[in-house]
Image (tube, coloured by chain):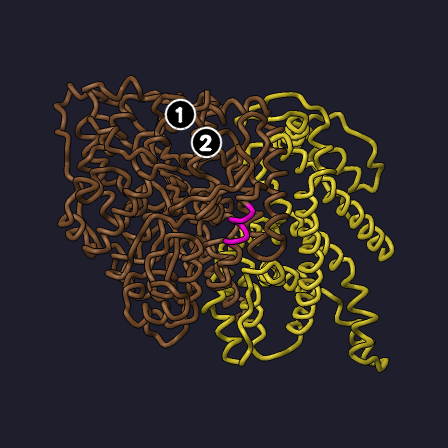
Chain colours: A yellow, B brown
Amino acid sequence: MAQEPVIPSGGVLNDVAQGGNVARRTKDPTGMFFLLPAAVWVLLFTIFPLLYALYTSFWSFRFGQRNQFVGLDNFVRLFTDANLHSALRVTLTFVIVTVVVEMLVGFGLALLLNQEIRGKSVLRAIMVLPLFATPVGMGFLGITLFYEINGPINVFLRTLGIEGIPWLSTPQWAPVAVMLIDIWQWTPFVFLVSLAALQGLPVDLYEAAEVDGASGWDSFRNITLPLMTPTLWLILLLRLVEAFKVFDIPASMTLGGPGRATEVYSLFTYRTALRFFDHGYAAAQGILLLFIVMLIVTLLFGRIRELYEVGG
Amino acid sequence: MRGFKFLSVLLVLSMILAACGGGGAPAAAPAEQAAPAGEAAAEEAPEAEATAIPGGETYATVTEGSDILPPVLVEPCEPGSCPFEGQTVTVIVNTAGSKGPISGPFYEVREEFEAATGATLEIVEVPEAEHFPKLMTDVTTGTGQYDTSIAGAWWVGDLVEGDFIISYDDYFDDPRFPQWDYEDVQSGPRSLLEYGGKKYMVANDHDGQVMYYRRDLIEDPEHQAAFLEEYGYELGVPQTWDQFRDVAEYFDGKDLNGDGTPDDGLTLHLKVGGQGMFHFMSFSAPFVIGPDNPKLYWFDPETMDPLMASPGHLRAMETLVDLLQFGPEAMMAWSLGESWDHFLRGQAALTFTWGDLGSLAQEEGSQVRGKTGAALMPGTMEYFDAAAGEWKATETPNMVGNTTGGSWSGVISKFSDAPEATYYLLALMATKEKSLIYAQRGWDGVDPGRFSHYLPPEGTASLDGYVAAGWDGQDATDYTKAYHDNFGAELQFPYLRIPGAFEYWNSLDIHLSEAATGQKTPEEALQATADDFDAITDRLGRDLQQASYKASLGLE
């Protein structure tokens, strides 16, 4: 005889377990007690800093201390500051290039290493290693790799008869060098999550397709890609959010130079706050970045929800 | 399953490696640099030491070769009668370790200080990029965690105007403290110790840029003959920037160290955040400063309008950008460590930089020991007098001394609960006996700037002392004379010490890089700098900035 699940308290869980009305609330305070740590956490570390940043953005600062209430002046500066616009442009380029390359290469490698090939485990392990290095360490490693006079990459290029590339000293190549290091570090993330998702795909679908005479490309286009789409959207979302916040790699490799060629948004905000002590303007910059990221998250979440709903 | 185990082991190992490798380099430490691969000087050195300084960057270049120690000067106190029993002095200093520049001498003096005072010395090392933010956070919140900061001279405007540090005027002549000779510090660096007529920084490091040249090349008869034929005058130590250009052009592309590959006419460091703006300051000074305009470089003190786009600044920028063709293209991305390394390998004939290079040239691994001459920075034959709005010619080269750099020295926090013990520590390290040893050694980052550091007839130090510290005699003679001439020059580059100094300099640094890498013309770069200066001045308060600027120039 089937027994009803026994759940000690927490009316919502009971409702779910019994297929009842989730909207019906219990007055049992125990549930609220368990929620309290999370609520305090959110209040302390999310809501309060957000409100404090908003409050700070209405002030000008001198000697690192609040000086004068300036209303929306700091937000108006966001629209007139050419240096900020430059940082936004650099960041957008960085985000688009790195995320697209990471998604393509990471997913491609996951497909490759999802096959039955010799040394698959070793290759997978090696593939994910860069993910565990600290970004600032990767940046310093980047200085060494891209060192123009006798760095290993230029030495290698010269052995092929190719003139060394001015990786870090020109505004054309420095962004490329920074993006290559980011791609090196974060492609394994796309690879790792994609591979995990690929391994969870139902094998019987592929077997059925094979029986029906589908080619490899047909299986990829009609089975793998549709089933992987929600996962890929999720990876895209995570990478976009992280890429917008990039700091360590350009900060350790180029400090934003030459000129402002690699000065990304977070580095610009870091300088505003902790080098120039213009905390009000830095807070306004932070709020703008938050707005941009929230917009992306909302749009992509909407898309992901649609996909899950369509998929049942 | 075996594959999974292997993967697990690899993952754990990689995580440990990541933790070990990255843990020591905080994310917000953009100024700290790793040595590029294949740097021969570092490879040849069995125990590479962290070296560097002015802006506080750390770099592995050459080894510690000179191991002389400063004398112990104060006697241990009797328990129960120690002057600062139970007190703790906390010093915040740029990260470099117990044998590193600026921080090293604090570890060295700790035992002596603690025995003489009964106080405890705690040393907090932070990367240069985090030093000022941490200090400002400490003083703006009134926490008082740090009793003293070994501060960059450009911070003093913010620290004094913000009422965050105290003057040591009352302690200076007090016999309870170690006595050091204020007048021994030469006039250039001495001016940085004061603000508004009061003493704030206790003398320690003395930064200023001088020109370094390869003496062996300049004195080579074959080069002299070839140069004479090509340029129509005798090869010698450049006196003007025009001559500097000729010498750089002549040596560019020649093999200067016998390794069979062409080398460079000069080397500089122009990476954004790599202190390139200091190069421009020292370089441009004689284009703007002159006998009729000894002080106006940054702003018009009556309006606080920036002078950065003046014809003098423009010619300086154009000249500097033109010179860059005689150096490696890579130097646009170099911090000072890489540039010094290039010179120390014998790969450049000329440079202009801080005192560290002269002493590093004496260390093990250097290829230019005994070949490194030093002299006052070259000048110009005319300068643009901003006050009169016209170019003025000079009969002799218009040469201007400078104190550009950090001149890292101790200031006492207003929130210190042990200000007297703190001053005792700083004064002990400022004594003539200790300072001389600091200046003679390469590794501790303390550069010369006192009469007691110079050789006769300019000063009182002995050549034997420098030789005992590992110096080549002629190198030491040239070096100390260059610093004496630089800091004692009648005209001095006006150091900017008003609130927001770093923000002004950061703008100059970025726009200099844009001009150097062809993103902007020199004119556009300087106009952009002037526009930024205006915006910063408006934000910080034009009237307040004007008052600070006038005070810093002694115009009040």
Q: Position of residue B391 (x, y in %)?
A: 52, 42
Q: Nearer the viewer, residue B325 or B272?
A: B325
Q: Quadrant of the N terminus of chain B?
A: bottom right
- Which of disc 2 and disc 1 is earlier in sequence? 1
Q: Is residue B389 magenta?
A: no
Secondary structure of the magenta portion, mostly? helix
Q: Residues within 10 Å of mark 2 (few under 14, many from 20)?
A: many
Residue A34 visible: no
Residue A51 visible: yes
Q: Which residue is mark 2?
A: B497
Mark 2 and mark 1 in contact (Cβ < 8 Å)? yes
Instruction: Same chain for labels 1 and 2? Say yes or no.
Output: yes
Chain of the residue where label 2 is placed in the rendered structure = B
Q: Which residue is mark 1?
A: B195
Chain of the residue where label 1 is placed in the rendered structure = B
Q: Residues within 10 Å of mark 1 (few under 14, many from 20)?
A: many
**B65 relative to B460, above or below:** below
Q: Position of residue A275 (x, y in %)?
A: 53, 37
User: What residue range appears in magenta?
Assistant: B314-320
Give me the residue at 15% from left, 19% from top: B80
Quarter of the figure with residue B461:
top left
Q: Nearer the viewer, residue B236 or A306?
A: B236
Residue type for callout 1: Tyr
Q: Position of residue B423 (x, y in %)?
A: 28, 25
Give me the residue at 43% from left, 53% from top: B241
